[in-house]
Image (cartoon, rainbow, N blue to C red):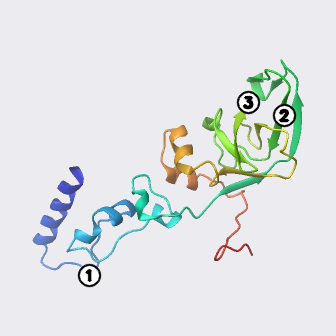
Amino acid sequence: MYMERQINLFKEILGRLARVPGIVHVSNSSAIFKVERNLEFSTHARLGIGLYGLSDDVPASVGLRQVMTFESAVASIRTLSKGDKLGYGATYEAQGDERIAVIPVGYADGLLRGNRDGVIDVAGTRVPLVGTICMDACFAKVGESVKRGDMVRIFGGEVTTSEVAGRLSTITYEVVTGISKRVPRTYVRKGMRP
């Protein structure tokens, strides 16, 4: 295993030093849960993506809990008839009468265009994104119960960051750090919003 080779080389280098530093670490979030307890030379570890309650390769039994969601709300509902087209380039065509939620989140916010044909969570239900994701908006095909103002979760509800990362062929860290500065942040303390 390559990681073992790296650890052994690190230990060898430490052994060559005239004085070992007071702080010695090699573990990132994943290694903290996998190997840290067996590293007798380690004094510290670097918790990165684990701070978000995420990891791409830590077993579920560890109990990490995701600490963030990317949310919006339905801005309006539009009804398309069969044959109507939607979005830039008319990339989506309604197959019948369809209800479309307009959501004010786009690629300038961090919902990248590669999410096209993906899913989001609208009012607790997974629904398909349709049409081209715009700079400031996206569109989802929704059922009759969805109304203006309903909560939308791009990730962190029914849709996980791992799912979004897989859709984009990337890692969860890129998904969560890709949320732009223009998206308002709400910090929650002990499960309560301020």
**Amino acid bearing label 3:** Gly
Would you name the residue on which mark 2 appears? Answer: 99
Residue located at (65% from left, 34% from top): 116
Q: Alpha-carbon distance for marks 3 and 1?
A: 56 Å
The mark that comes first in sequence, 3 or 2, is 2
- In this rendering, which labeled residue sits more in front, label 1 or label 2? 2
Comes first in the chain, label 3 or label 1: 1
Disc 2 marks which amino acid? Arg
Residue 162 vs residue 150: left or right?
A: left
| Kind of residue sitting beneath label 1 | Gly
Q: Which mark is residue 22?
A: 1
Which quadrant of the view contains residue 112?
top right
Residue placed under numbered mark 3 in the picture: 131
Near-viewer residue (95 or 18): 95
- Rendered residue at 52%/50% (across/down): 174
Q: Quadrant of the C terminus?
A: bottom right
